[in-house]
Amino acid sequence: MSDYIPYPEKKNKFDSLVMNYIAKKIFEDIEDTDAYDLDILDSVGNEIGGLSQGNQWAFTNFDRFILALKQIVGQDRLRDLLDSYKWIDEMDPLFIMNMDEKTDFNKISACLRKIVTKIDGSTYLPSELEHDGEYIENNSLEFSKQVSKALTIMTFLLYTLRNKGIPTSIDFDKNIKPSVECTFHIRPAGTFAECLSFCKEYKMVDSSGITNEGIRKLVSIANDLVEGDMLNSKDERIENQVRNWKKIGEIRNV
C-alpha cells in the first residue's frame, strides 16, 4: 500500500498542526514556559540564564520568535486574533504535537475534566464517594498542570498494582514518568515523594501496596480513559500502558 499523500492533503494536515501549536504558544504565559521553569527567562521574558547543551531545547529559535511576536504585537491582541483557539490553552503542548484531524477535543476535554475532578475530590470527599459529573473548579493550579498531576498519580497507582508493591524512586523516574508521556502524550508532573504522599494520605496505598480504595479509583479512572477515547497512543516504547489501562477499563463493578 502506498504511503503517498497528495500535497493538498499533506498541507492541510501540516498547517492545522502548526496553527494549533502556535496558538498554544500565544496563549501560554511566560511563567508556564519551559524556559521559565529552567530559569532561562524571568517573569517578563528577559534572559537571565545561559543556554547549555542540556537545556537549549527549552528556548529554541521558535520560542524566541514567539516571545518577540508577543512583545511587538502584544499578547492580548494576538489572543484576540486567535479567540477561536482559546480552548487550546488548557492542553499540554506534547498532546498538541500528537493531535491529528480526527482528535475530538470536546470529548478529550470532558474526559480530562472528569479525571481531574475525581482526583481533586479525593482531598475532601469521604472514601468511596467521588464527583462523577462535570469539572469542578477547586484548584488554583493551571488546568493542564492539574491533568499532568492526576495522570502521574494514577500511573503511579497502576505500577503499584502491576508490581504488587509500591514503586521505588528509580521506578518513578525510569518507568512511570515516561509512561505518562508515551501513554497519554501528556507530560508528567510532581516527584516520587509527592505521589507517594498523596496516595498514602488519601488511602490509595499502604505499606503492603495498593488498597481497595486505590483499586476502585484506578478502575474508575480507567473507565473514563476508555470512554473518553484517551487510549490511542501508538508509541512503541515498553512504557506505553494503553493495553493495561484498557484491561482495567473493562472492569465495571468494584
Image (cartoon, helix red, strand yellow):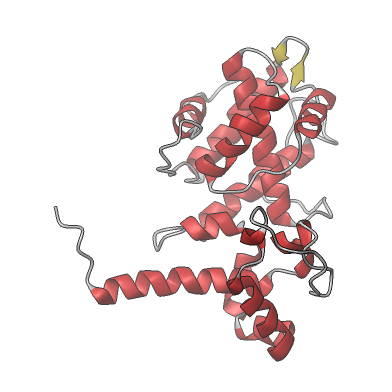
- Image x and y of residue 80, in percent: 66, 84
Q: Along the horizontal axis of the image, is 47 left or right of 246?
A: right
Quick one: quadrant of the C terminus? top right
User: Is residue 94 at all visible to an observer of this figure?
Assistant: yes
Residue name at image x 65 percent, y 75 percent = 64
Residue found at x 25% / y 75%? 7
On the image, the x and y values in percent for residue 28 come to: 69, 69
Looking at this rendering, what residue extends furthest in the left direction?
1
Residue at the spot 57% in from the left edge and 18% down from the top edge: 162
Identified at 80% across, 60% down, the residue is 39
From this view, report whether residue 237 is shown above or below residue 103.
above
Picture coordinates of residue 226, whole percent (x, y): 49, 38
- Residue 234 appears left or right of 211: left
- Give the left or right position of residue 195, taking residue 183 as reference: right
Residue 228's place in the image compared with 192, above or below, is below
Compared to 56, does 236 lie above or below?
above
Q: Farthest residue toward the top?
A: 208
Q: Quadrant of residue 100?
A: bottom left
**Circle count:** 0
- Tell me the quarter of the picture where residue 46 sits: bottom right
